[in-house]
Image: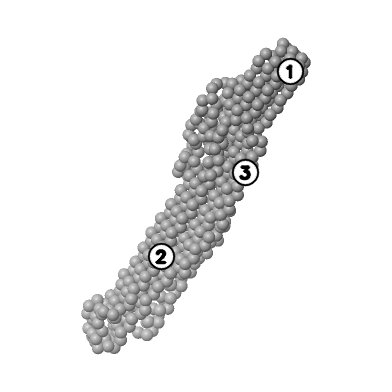
Amino acid sequence: MKASVLRYAAIGMATLSLAGFAAASTVSVGTTGPDSNNQVSQKNTQKLNTTNNNAAGVTNFNAQDSESGDVSAAKNTSVQGGLNGSGNASNANSTNTNVSVNNSSSSNMLHGLASGPVPSDDVRLNLTGPDSNNQVKIDNSQTVNVRNNNLVDVQNVNLQSAQSGDVSAYKNTTVGGLSSGDAHNSNTTTTSVNIQN
Amino acid sequence: MKLMRMVGSASVAGMVSVMLAGVAMASDVSLATTGPDSDQSVKIDNSTSANIDNTNYVNVSNTNVQASQTGDVSADKNTSVGGCVCSGNAENTSNTNTTVSINNPVGGLEQGVGGSGGEVSQPAGGKGGSVLGASTGGSGAGAPAVLPEVGAKFPVDVTALRNALSAQSAALTATLADRTQGLRTVLLGLAVLMTIVGGAGSFVYARRMQQQA
């Protein structure tokens, strides 16, 4: 019996929000009157949130059993070898599991923020009036949040049993060349898990 | 019987907080011909922050149970026995190869340097991070500054990362351990059961052969 079960589905959830794109701000205050009060407030916000939830579960179950028959020679004049033997019992199993999780696009987004176009603010105050109050406030904010949750569970189970048959020679005149077969189990399990965030 | 059970469990939590302060934005402030007794104020706050939270849980369990047995050979009450009256070979081979690779790259972030004028407030470093970039800002030309590459680009020190395991990842680890506990118990029980059944079968067969003899 051999079974491979994918127990968890991969879940990918990404949330991307862009608010108040951090474009360049240009503020120009010119020719203000005496005793005037001029206030400019500009807020640019760029926010990126990404969450990757990956869950992968693999179970490989292998159970094998092989047995060769018994051989019995009784009360013969002559029993010689050759075909008069128990056969070989052999099991072989090979399991190869590869799990790869790649969230590199999220980190690429982070690099994109750092290397992206630079917003440029241009503030010019010219010809302000006497006793005037001129205030400019610009708030530029860029935030990137990347959260990667990766869960990988691999279970490899191998059960093998091989038994060659018994050989019995009883009350024969001449007996030779009787042998029981070989019993052989072979298993190869290869598991590779690669996570790239 | 050859029983080999190998369990590899690695729980890796990496949380990296990258705080870029005083910021990759160019600002140009110009004040000209201001009035007497006038009050001019220009304030520009630039802030950039990047937070990466990686929680990796990898569990690989390899259970291998192998049993090989060759048959018995008996030659009894024969006049002449010659040649090979022999039992075969019993052999178990198992080859297990497990590779786990986790890559949490950090670094290579670049930022430009701010322009002239204005008040620039620089936020303090981020929470719990191991990466703090160079703080730039204020006056100066827009020559780019490159943050130093810090942190483990290819983390191999699982112990250190495990020590930094957050409460959230610890809860996740506990959940996984509980989830797989049942399966492990069943498999171990199955192995024990097979051993008992095999031994009992051999015993019964041996008794039967003795009775026939």
Residue beneath label 3, please? A16
Chain letter for the residue marked with disc 2 in the picture:
A
Chain letter for the residue marked with disc 3 in the picture:
A
Residue B205 in the image: above or below residue B110? below
Q: In this view, does B80 lie to the left or right of B184?
A: left
Q: Residues within 10 Å of mark 2 (few under 14, many from 20)?
A: some
Chain letter for the residue marked with disc 1 in the picture:
A
SS for callout 1: loop
Q: Residues within 10 Å of mark 1 (few under 14, many from 20)?
A: many
Residue shown at 48%/54% (left/top)? Answer: A99
Residue shown at 43%/61% (left/top)? Answer: A95
Where is residue B111? Give x, y as percent.
Answer: 53, 31
Is disc 1 in contact with disc 2, using a CB cutoff of under 8 Å? no
Q: In this view, does B21 lie to the left or right of A131?
A: left
Where is residue B51? Give x, y as percent.
Answer: 58, 38
CA gap, disc 1 to disc 2? 87 Å
Q: Which amino acid does label 1 sit on?
A: Thr
Q: Which mark is residue A32?
A: 1
Residue beneath label 2, please? A93
The front one of A94 and A101 is A101
Q: Which colour scheme is used?
A: one colour
Where is residue A169? Give x, y as percent.
Answer: 29, 82
Q: Is residue A74 left or right of residue A196?
A: left
Q: Residues within 10 Å of mark 3 (few under 14, many from 20)?
A: few
SS for callout 2: strand
Question: Which badge, 1 or 2, comes first in the chain's sequence?
Answer: 1
Is disc 3 in contact with disc 2, using a CB cutoff of under 8 Å? no
Q: In this view, does B152 lie to the left or right of A163?
A: right
Q: Are marks 3 and 2 on the same chain?
A: yes
Question: Which badge, 3 or 1, comes first in the chain's sequence?
Answer: 3
SS for callout 3: loop
